[in-house]
Image (cartoon, rainbow, N blue to C red):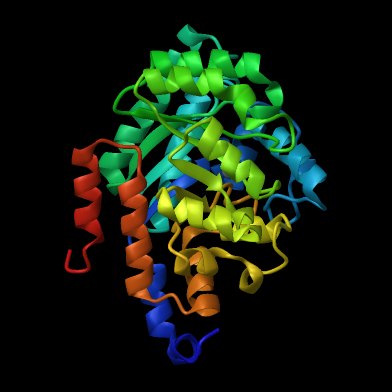
Amino acid sequence: MDEETRQRIADMDEEQLHRIANLPKVELHTHFEGCAPPVFIRGLAAEKKIDISKAFKADGSYAYRDFVHFLEVYEAATSVLKTPEDFARLCTAVLEQSAENGVIYQETFLSPDFCGGGDVAAWREYLHAIQEAASVAERAHGIVLRGIVTPIRHFGPDKAKRTALCAAETAGDWIVGLGMGGDENKGKQRDFAYAFDMAREAGLRLTTHAGEWRGPEEVRDAVNDLRVERIGHGVRAIYDLATVDMLAEREITLEVCPGSNVFLGVFPSLDQHPIDQLRRRGVKVTVSTDDPPFFHTTMRDEYVNLAKTFGWDEAILTDINKTAAGAAFCDQTTRDAILKKLEPSS
Ligand SMILES: [Zn+2]
């Protein structure tokens, strides 16, 4: 760490950290169900008389011992979400939580596999309910939500094609992208090229999870084989500087989720996380929470932690938000409105 950064960290007082926490934020990488506030899930489970008490700690937060247990808890928690109405209510709860954290624009991964079992007609119904709730939240809190349809990698390429069809059929100014999630250790990025080509043909923008669990090669595969313009995580690119430079040169935006990475042990601690190094080497980095309540994080926490660890001040964080707005998959009118809100004077 250089002397200037050390000094900036030393000079940070509570007031500045408070201003940093309150900055307007653009968040590109969230999983819709993964944003579910525990209190909302507990309430829905009680209404439906589904016992998922094992998923919670005594203080009401999500409980788990390790990554495998986390997946079980995630599955149990999200199993109470069944109907379009459930997803509409989830949308309301999620956007309220995001708005409280200063998020002004959010993109979220939505899975037709969980919303109607991959059937296009059923998917439209879920989507309609979610969009309605999102417009109400936009009027109430000023927060704008856009959806990215997500094929689940470990469900395999055939299901991904069906998912991409749902995406293509509903592509427009609200469903704006295709972004693969799921287990990165299963198969290759190129196995999903057909699904990504279909989405691109339909005018959708592309991202995929890569370089969270696997290394730089996976990041290169994502760029070369799926021709994505953003990458979910991508942080393990740091183990090969040629890959890092390729990301910078081709202006690929990374959706970095530092709290998630530390929580899941991708890096042992925030000060050993490569986000600052990637930024300094010219990569377009952005900041998101992934599945915030599951990783016991919020956008406010992320910003404060980044400020305290790397000396990121308002200017750097505003710059990062502008990068995120630039890489957002929304239309230009929406982007211009976001950029305006990021100006310190507004
Ligand atoms: Zn993710």
- Residue 268 point in image, percent of width and height: 73, 66
Determine whether 221 is above or below 172 in the image: below
Determine whether 14 is above or below 129 in the image: below
- Residue 48 point in image, percent of width and height: 65, 26
Along the horizontal axis of the image, is 47 left or right of 311?
right
Q: Nearer the viewer, residue 234 or 16?
A: 234
Q: Quadrant of ligand 1?
A: top right
Residue at image coords 35%, 58%: 321
Q: Nearer the viewer, residue 67 or 266?
A: 266
Residue at image coords 66%, 34%: 182
Q: Nearer the viewer, residue 222 or 130?
A: 222
Where is the C terminus found, in terms of image quarters?
Answer: bottom left
- Residue 139 point in image, percent of width and height: 25, 40
Along the horizontal axis of the image, is 147 left or right of 325?
right
Where is the N terminus found, in terms of image quarters?
Answer: bottom right
User: How many marks on residues?
Assistant: 0
Along the horizontal axis of the image, is 207 left or right of 105?
right
Residue that extends furthest to the front in the rendered view of this protein: 242
- Residue 249 point in image, percent of width and height: 42, 53
Residue at image coords 51%, 69%: 276
Residue 104 in view of the camera: no
Q: Quadrant of residue 275?
A: bottom right
Residue at image coords 56%, 53%: 243
Q: Nearer the viewer, residue 252 or 101?
A: 252
Residue 70 in view of the camera: yes
